[in-house]
Amino acid sequence: MTKHTISPQTGIMGEAFACECGVVLVGRMTAELHAAENNLCSVCLGSALEQVAPDVARDCTACAGTGRRKEQITWQLAYAEAEHLITMTVVRGIVSGFDGPFHLSEIADTVRAGLGLPTGRLPVGPRVRDLLLQLQVAGEITMLSAPDEMLGTDMVLYRDPQWQRARTLGL
Ligand SMILES: [Zn+2]
Ligand SMILES: [Zn+2]
């Protein structure tokens, strides 16, 4: 089986990628198409890594760190299912039971237990985080935990952020 590991190239052609099979792919879209045709994840181009910042990489979240197209599609469907199942009403209801500070992981665990989902079945954490961030923007909850990791000057990676309901803070 021919390998199709695609890597970015720095050169005179602007954005270009080289594939192990010998082709040179000009432009991000061409590289994504070549990855998809060869059953590789179109986000990480089969590398299984996601570049969060110039020198920070983590497992690609689109394909669960596998680099494969099949997993990427499975996860896309799982994200859609998580969005459908885990609604703002569900998360707001759980949050209202906390008078003190709570972690993202506590809410995610409660959601998972409430829906009877085994760990890893659906991307519960990312979905719950998105909803909690929406509640934060709406002013219903306040983030308490300090950023865990600064990536560059304006990007922050939160590992397990902590919030508290604004009303219980006396704000
Ligand atoms: Zn190739
Ligand atoms: Zn990927």
Image: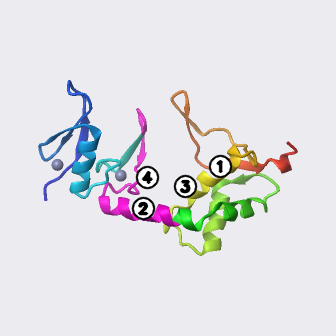
The residue depicted at 55 percent of the width and 30 percent of the height is: 154
Q: Is residue 52 left or right of residue 18?
A: right
First in sequence: mark 1 or mark 4? 4
User: Which amino acid lies under the numbered mark 3 shown in the image of this protein?
Assistant: Pro
Q: Are marks 2 and 4 in contact (CB under 8 Å)?
A: no
Quarter of the image for the N terminus: give it.
Answer: bottom left
Q: Using the image, tell me which numbered label, if any, was put on residue 75.
A: 2
Q: CA distance from mark 2 to mark 3?
A: 12 Å
User: Which amino acid lies under the numbered mark 2 shown in the image of this protein?
Assistant: Trp
Residue 85, magenta (yes or no): no
What percent of the width, then of the height, locates residue 164?
76, 49
Between 169 and 83, the one lying in front of the other is: 83
Secondary structure state at the residue bearing disc 2: helix
Q: Residues within 10 Å of mark 2 (few under 14, many from 20)?
A: some
Q: Using the image, tell me which numbered label, if any, was put on residue 61.
A: 4
Q: Which residues are magenta?
A: 52-81
The residue depicted at 70 percent of the width and 46 percent of the height is: 136
Secondary structure state at the residue bearing disc 3: helix
The residue depicted at 30 percent of the width and 59 percent of the height is: 69
User: Which amino acid lies under the numbered mark 1 shown in the image of this protein?
Assistant: Gln
First in sequence: mark 3 or mark 1? 3
User: Which amino acid lies under the numbered mark 4 shown in the image of this protein?
Assistant: Thr
Circle 1 or circle 4, nearest the eye? 1
Secondary structure state at the residue bearing disc 1: helix
Asked if 91 appears above or below 117 in the picture, the reply is: above
Q: Are marks 3 and 4 in contact (CB under 8 Å)?
A: yes
